[in-house]
Image: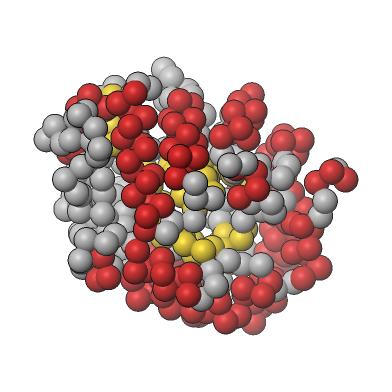
Amino acid sequence: MDKNKFAVTPPMGWNSYDYYDTTVNEQQVKDNADFLAANLKQYGWEYVVVDIEWYSNDAGTQRKEFQYIPFGDDEIDQWGRFQPSPHRFPSSADGSGFTGLAEYVHGLGLKFGIHIMRGIPRVAAERHLPVYGTEYTADMVADPSSICGWNPDMYGVRNTQAGQAYYDGLIAMYASWGVDFIKCDDICDSWMYPDDRFSGWHETEMLYKAIQKTNRPIVLSLSPGPAHVDRAWQYCKYANMWRITDDFWDNWELLKNMFWRCELWQDHVKEGCYPDCDMLPLGKVGGGFGHGEWDCRFTKEEQKTMMTLWCMFRSPLMAGAELTKMDDFTMSLLTNRELLSLLGEDFRGK
């Protein structure tokens, strides 16, 4: 499969993170999907992405420095693969994963995506769980020296046959659920690991190979940034989009800095390969972070600036708002056909 044909224009959709953090549930996803289908699909918005910790039964119950609960109450199958929390996603209670939710989203004429963390669950390695379809066990796959700095639930995956077999089984499961989009976290930042700045390189290729084996056109998104521009060739070879910044929020300094980031990456934008400016914190955001929702803190002119930059640069567009609380001004930005048309211009004309 030609992965560049999975996304001939920059992907557009909704992601649960900016509003719900780790806490989104099935009904909330459906409500936002319904809004997207009824009001935004005709403008090109088509992905519905469930972000981080959909497998956590206790997400949002502790609020300290970070929103993630290390080694929390997570759903995992006998082959060491996370499963949706049945408390939050009732359609998964029969063991079918996200199949039911994906079918609902597909029934609206939309596409379904999920967030994953790079690597293999540490608990799978500690329990020596078998790797699906092989004689390997998770401890043979895991690299205990490779641990995310802000969510320690995972070990990195070794660049071995066992490691590839694990990713093959994982991505095959996602494909069987009907997943169209995978956002892999902790894989392309250039500052997180001072002793191995590019620790996710081989895992990016392994994910690509696993997707190819499914024969399903799954868009691969790498996160967080800043990605390293010297490795742009590799991101473009194996992924469809990759973050060029850390998490972006409604802060003027972050928006101002995005101009030089876009300038740095502009020559690497082409069909199927999109440096990613991150989600759009428009409308109502922050409701799941434990301190109350807020309206986008950018002025209206700053919001216009953000949308214009993202579209001129041809960044992927992922709305982060609670769509069911959409205001007229935000709606006008997300449905500006003249602006959105920039995303579909012929890349050969650059």
Residue 319 falls in image quadrant: bottom right
Q: Quadrant of the C terminus?
A: top right
Specify the farthest residue to the right.
349
Q: Which residue is drawn at 38% across and 44% down?
A: 171
Please state which of residues 348 and 242 is positioned toward the viewer in this rendering: 348
Please state which of residues 73 and 44 is positioned toward the viewer in this rendering: 44
Please state which of residues 176 and 285 is positioned toward the viewer in this rendering: 176
All told, the count of numbered labels is 0
Q: In this view, does 170 lie above or below 194?
A: below
- 205 on left or right of 56: right
- 53 on left or right of 267: left
Residue 135 falls in image quadrant: top left
Q: Residue at x 30, y 26 (%)?
A: 162
Structure colour scheme: secondary structure
**Residue 139 visible, this orientation:** yes
Q: Where is residue 239 in the image (x, y as percent from the top left)?
A: 56, 39
Q: Where is residue 71 in the image (x, y as percent from the top left)?
A: 19, 44
**Residue 88 visible, this orientation:** no
Q: In which quarter of the image is the N terminus?
A: top right
Specify the farthest residue to the left.
127
Q: In this view, does 310 lie above or below 33?
A: above
Q: Which residue is drawn at 53% across and 39% down?
A: 225
Q: Which residue is drawn at 49% across and 46% down?
A: 215
Specify the farthest residue to the top.
195
Q: Where is residue 64 in the image (x, y as percent from the top left)?
A: 26, 51
Q: Where is residue 240 in the image (x, y as percent from the top left)?
A: 59, 43
